[in-house]
Amino acid sequence: MSNSSSVSEFLLLAFTDTRELQLLHFTLFLGIYLAALLGNGLILSAVACDHHLHTPMYFFLLNLALLDLGCISTTVPKAMANALWDTRAISYQGCVAQVLFFVFFIGAEYSLLTIMAYDRYVAICKPLHYGSLLGSRACAQMAAAAWGSGFLYSVLHTANTFSLPLCRGNVLDQFFCEIPHILKLSCSDAYLREAALLVVSFCLAFACFVFISFSYVQIFRAVLRMPSEKGPQKTFSTCLPHLAVVSLTLSTALVAYLKPPSISSPSLDMVVSFLYSVVPPAVNRLIYSMRNQELKDALWKLIGYMLLLHQ
């Protein structure tokens, strides 16, 4: 990444120039961040402490909570600091780190959501093979593959992006370092390499989406054949939250990256990026806990235990 000599820092897009609104944005981000820390932290603690939740589904949910924490911690604290201290600057090294970790967590999360769809497919469509196909070793290997693929994907994109010569200033029209906005500063046709990598990434994401869609088509077909009412209810309580999380993550990311240039503007880009980079990590745990009785019971048990300790 030899390009560090030409650009020592980047200027991020400010939410507003009014000091009162900057403090309001800081308070909003702080509330969202603390809620995400608390919610995901409770899920991590509940799954780790309750032996009833030591199953493949909750093991993957624990990994999802970790990735959500990492994702929101990559972008929000810097946005909070900039709003509080009335600055727009981020160092070159800080920008590299932000791109590296953000792409890592997003890539690993999408891989994990695909694995979670497979978990639900096997649990409902092939229940007799569930123990053999999703044993503890297989689950650990799949989770490691999700984290590993996210890391390799991130290193590839980050190295390719920051190897480009930047000669169109250092102003990014975004509240965090995002690859498409960094590519706009490049003055070389070499940026087409990264653009091609992004296209390949979308193709891989689409393949995962097709796999997830196929899994749920099979799941819903199996559910409709269930004779009792309890079976479908339990199935929907575990499958619908995952489907909602996938839909939220995909829809916001697609709008962010595939919206027509004719309707693009800095303010719209900022709102859309906020929706896909901040909202899913903040609300995923709410989606999972609303319909999942086992998880709700474990969370209430954990909260009750914590309250007893403080008495």
Image: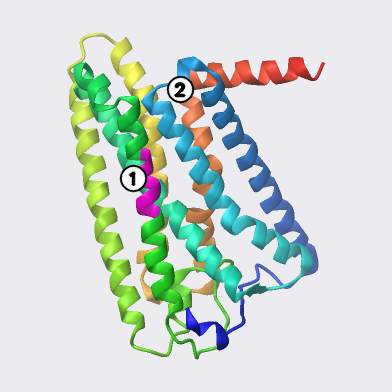
The residue lying furthest to the front in this view is 137
Q: According to the image, label 2 marks what residue? A: 292
215 above or below 157? above
Task: State if disc 2 and disc 1 touch (CB < 8 Å).
Answer: no
Image x and y of residue 1, in percent: 47, 78
Q: Residues within 10 Å of mark 1 (few under 14, many from 20)?
A: some
First of labels 1, 2 by sequence position = 1
Image x and y of residue 295, in percent: 50, 22
Mark 2 belongs to which amino acid? Asn
96 above or below 120? below
Q: Is residue 272 visible?
A: no
Kind of element beneath mark 2? loop
In the rendered structure, does residue 296 fall within the stretch colored magenta? no
Quadrant containing the C terminus in the rendered view: top right
Q: Quadrant of residue 229?
A: top left
Give the residue drawn at x 46%, y 22%.
292
Residues 293 and 43: in front is 43
Q: According to the image, label 1 marks what residue? A: 145
Q: Is residue 102 left or right of residue 107?
A: right
Give the residue drawn at x 36%, y 41%.
113
On residue 32, the disc is none
